Image (tube, rainbow, N blue to C red):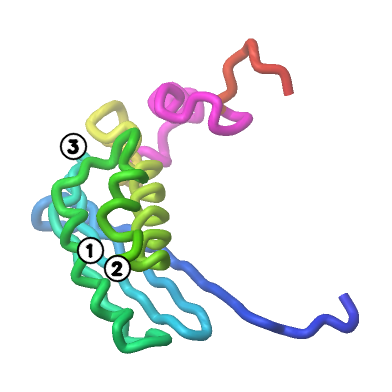
Amino acid sequence: MEGKIFLAKRDISIELFKLKEDGNAFIEAKFLDSGHLLRLEMEIEPESKKIVKCQAEMPNAPFQICSQTTKKAKSLIGLVIEKGVMKKIAEAVGGPCGCIHLRELASDAANFAAGVLIGYGKEGGGLLTAEFEKQPEEVRLRVTKEALQNNCLAYKEDKVVC
């Protein structure tokens, strides 16, 4: 790509950990671009998939007022990672009194958590465990198929033609 001129970059990183003391999932998500550094921490109870703790900080923002939106992260506490949660996240942290980047980061974190928590409490202990990844492919497919049906080729229904 000759002649291209760099304009901007955005990095989003999400890491998920299992807390040893209570078994909850801990997510640390970061949003970084030329004007922002936004960090979100979220703790999720795996069995209920409920957000039990949430906080955010914005040490770098284009305007001073932007960092005020991070207090809205606490409004995510009590939400359950299930169908319809993306709309609830948008309502809680987005809009004219919120932050589009906090909404994006919280949505990405919840989406990531949803994928990792599939099958929790079922065979293999759920995707939060290394043991699950050691299960044979047939077991992993069976446990995750219902939640991920028609989301990708591995989970497509037989009647769907690609």
Judge by depth and name the residue closer to the eye, 13 or 142: 13
Tell me which secondary structure the magenta stretch mostly adopts. helix
Q: Which residues are magenta?
A: 131-154
Q: Residue at x 63, y 30 (%)?
A: 153
Q: Quadrant of the N terminus?
A: bottom right
Dot 2 and dot 1 residues touching (CB under 8 Å):
yes
Q: Earlier in the sequence, mark 3 or mark 1?
A: 3
**Closer to us: mark 2 or mark 3?**
2
Judge by depth and name the residue closer to the eye, 140 or 93: 93
- Residue 50, by quadrant, is top left
Q: Which residue is mark 3?
A: 47
Gap in Å between the C-alphas at discs 2 and 3? 22 Å
Q: Is residue 82 above or below residue 24?
A: above
Where disc 2 sits, the SS reads: strand
Q: Amino acid at mark 3?
A: Glu
Q: Which residue is mark 2?
A: 40
Q: Amino acid at mark 1?
A: Ala
Residue 110 relative to residue 145: left or right: left
Dot 3 and dot 1 residues touching (CB under 8 Å):
no
Q: Earlier in the sequence, mark 2 or mark 3?
A: 2
Q: Earlier in the sequence, mark 2 or mark 1?
A: 2
Dot 2 and dot 3 residues touching (CB under 8 Å):
no
Q: Residue at x 19, y 70 (%)?
A: 71
Q: Which residue is mark 1?
A: 73
Q: Residues within 10 Å of mark 2 (few under 14, many from 20)?
A: many
